[in-house]
Image (spheres, helix red, strand yellow):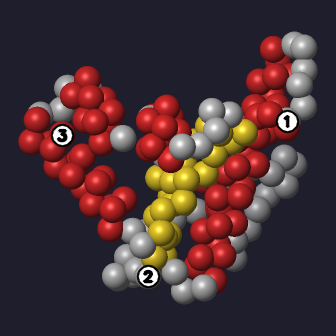
Amino acid sequence: MAEEFQRDLEKDGLLSEEVVKRVHRSQERITGAPVVIVLCVDMTEMDAYPDLQRKQAERIIAIQSAANAGMQLLLAAHAEGLGGVWVCSPIFAQKIVQVTLNTPQTWEPQAMFLIGYAAENPALRERKRLEEIVMFQGQEISTS
């Protein structure tokens, strides 16, 4: 994954020292995590449709289901006092992840979770106000 990440960063035109820095940071995060979980999608048991529109919809459903499972995994880790980070780097290097982990070809890596006890709790980030991200038709919302 590091080699593919490096090639992608170089294609993006980043300076070589920035490429080395990002690749090294990525490797440290992965190898430093006590637990690494790779989340995959497998379309073999999903419904098969003859038309492209429904095939694409079924694929989106599978990806949404996997993402929901990933969120549940992070919530469960948090409930146990663990920290977790969700990274999507496996989606950029699916073949190498499949080969490295010896997974079935039908398992399409989507995300990776780095789980462990947090060394520190990061500061809370400012969140957008509800009115900025939610729209209710025909109703005004009040957050007071």
Relative placement, left or right, of 125 versus 52 is: left
Residue 60, numbered circle: none
Spatial CA distance of label 2 from label 3 is 28 Å
Spatial CA distance of label 1 from label 2 is 36 Å
Circle 2 residue: 117
Relative placement, left or right, of 45 versus 90 is: right
**Sequence-wise first label, 1 or 2:** 1
**Residue at the image position 48 percent from the left and 37 percent from the top:** 99
Q: Amino acid at mark 1?
A: Met
Q: Which-is-in-front pick, marks 1 and 3? A: 1
**Sequence-wise first label, 2 or 3:** 3
Q: Is residue 43 above or below residue 77?
A: above
Counting other residues with Cα less than 10 Å from the Cα at mark 1, is it few (<14), some (14-19), or many (20 or more)? few
Q: Secondary structure at mark 1?
A: loop
> Of 71 and 24, which appears nearest the observer?
24
Looking at the picture, how far across and down is residue 67, in whole percent?
Answer: 67, 51
Image quarter where the N terminus lies is top left
Determine whether label 1 and label 3 are within 8 Å by CB.
Answer: no
Q: Is residue 91 visible?
A: no
Residue 46, numbered circle: 1
Q: Amino acid at mark 3?
A: Val
**Residue at the image position 64 percent from the left and 73 percent from the top:** 75
Q: Quarter-wise, where is residue 13 in the image? A: top left
> Of 45 and 52, which appears nearest the observer?
45
Image quarter where the C terminus lies is bottom right
Spatial CA distance of label 1 from label 3 is 39 Å
Relative placement, left or right, of 70 versus 37 is: right
Relative placement, left or right, of 29 versus 77 is: left
Circle 3 residue: 19
